[in-house]
Image (cartoon, rainbow, N blue to C red):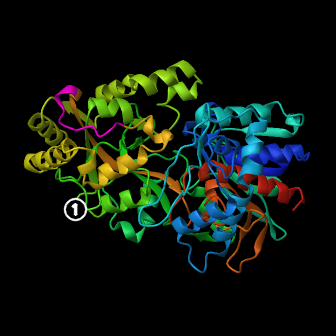
Amino acid sequence: MPDYRSDVLIVGGGIAGIAAALDLLDGGKSVLMLDRDEASAFGGLARESFGGMFFVDSPEQRRQGIRDSKDLALADWCSFAEFSPDDRWPRAWAEAYVERCTADVYRWVRRYGVSFLPVVNWVERGEFRPGNSVPRFHIAWGTGKGIAEALIGALRAHPNAGRLTLHFNHRVEQLTSRAGRVSGATGVDEKTGAAFEAEAEQVVIAAGGINGDLDRVRQNWHRDWGTPPKELLNGSHRFADGRLHVAAAAVGGVLTHLDKMWNYAAGVHHPRPRKPHHGLSLVPPRSALWLNWRGMRMGPQPLVSGFDTRRLVTDICAQERPYSWQLMNRKIALKELAISGAEFNPSIREKNKLGFVRDILLGNRWLVNEMLDNCEDFVTASSLPELVDKMNALQGDSAVDLGAVEDAVGRYDATIARGESLMNDEQLRRIAYLRRYRGDRIRLCKFQPINDPKALPLIAVREFIISRKSLGGIKTDLASRVLDSAGQPIAGLYAVGEAAGFGGGGMHGLRALEGTFLGGCILSGRIAATAIDGKM
């Protein structure tokens, strides 16, 4: 049996583990990192992400004239989180993130060459509860792939890189203890089938959340969402299966808030799936009509993205059939359709400035054509009757009612035709409001009718709930130490990133302000390293 030894064992090669390893190497520690995936996937889900990060009072905000403050950001965070009186550690982590994100995350990644687009995006503005009062979503130039590669490059080039050992295809099954403290882990090399044992003075769990295991997602489905959908897509990491949560609980760690999840409402099947139920999360076009399974417009409060993602999921899950349709035309799709993540944003991912400007000015033809040609959930037609026939053929029944679709489209288009001063429609009011901010205006149509002969063909997209992030996890204190049922730290054991609900077992509470996932991974990883170095 292979026997590995180091000062610190990090289980998981995502961005949280990498951040911890970098700071531990700075302190001269020997680090063993075990990751279940292939070496080519080093960086975890961050490598596939869009790379948005939440910062407060950043240089980009200041250059745009955006006045932000820690007090304002924390008030927004707590409003969206709806913390309970018992959420001591989640609230403490929220306060820590707001206080430290710009100094300890923004400046830290900038040191490794990561830069951000000049216009800060404004997401999760809030709907029935206040959300982000100002734009805070900073998009990395190079997407999450660029962030991951910058940090991995720094790890490999570190002056103490000789003290780092990386082993991939290693599945950790159990944590081991000795003399009253966690002292390592055992598992299997999935390439050879050989068992292994690792020993260390300190163990850091950085293995992601539970949302890659759809059975576990359904078992922990939040009561607000009723019965889990029969069709649920997977937008998480394929190895984010909660295996290390079980291992932590076996040595006394507390699991908390596992029903808190950040799922998305607009998931479609990946054209070239790499895992079971592989889904993509669309950035839902604001000018599209969001319809239920019958083809009726969702309401009375229409579904519009950018305000409260959780509300979108809640309303769709409340339907008799928990999936939905978005109806648009090609003009809307070219201007507004986007997919979250690095894979379908090649201009930003490859730092292609000309391509990025072209897509904004002329529309993202490549993306629209790719999805129309290859994604099973997209249908297109030149008329509403033809479109509804294709929607029903796709679903395999006659659920979509042509009369309902014609009524929804006719009323919406007629409202636009009356002119801007008479647009008594909540979705159109929101579009007018969104267009006042330049970060939205450049990717948003100006009151575009749906059934417009000049904008055809019509496009309908069938959308499912897609599992994405775990907001709960292993309970930790402000040193990233795993806590037992008495609230005491378990000697030798730390948890960081999504495994710890990004800090404290759920620093986001009920909802996330977006951009805090990558940032939470980095901050919690760095805090664990500081604690292990004895500098806290």
Residue at 31% across, 34% down:
332
For label 1, the crowd category at 10 Å Cα-Cα, with few meaning under 14, some 14 to 19 and many 20 or more, is few
Residue nearest the observer in this picture, 108 or 221: 108
Quadrant position of the N terminus in the picture:
top right
Q: Residue 94 at what x, y percent from top left? A: 65, 64
Identify whether 472 is placed above or below 134: below
Quadrant position of the C terminus in the picture:
bottom right
Q: Give the total of numbered labels.
A: 1
* Location of residue 417 (image quadrant): top left
Amino acid type at image mark 1: Glu
Query: Image check: 125 left or right of 224?
Result: right
Residue nearest the observer in this picture, 411 or 481: 411
Q: Residue 102 at what x, y percent from top left? A: 72, 50
Query: Image check: 162 left or right of 261?
Result: right
Residue at 15% across, 43% down:
396
Q: Does residue 198 appear in the picture of this structure?
A: no
Q: Residue 293 at what x, y percent from top left? A: 21, 52
Q: Does residue 332 appear in the picture of this structure?
A: yes
Q: Residue 107 at what x, y percent from top left? A: 76, 43
Which residue position is annotated with label 1?
320
Identify whether 524 is placed above or below 438: below
Element carrying mark 1: loop
Q: Which residues are magenta?
A: 445-454
- Magenta-span inclusion, residue 449: yes
Q: Residue at the top extreme?
A: 354
Residue at 17% across, 50% down:
295
Residue nearest the observer in this picture, 15 or 63: 63
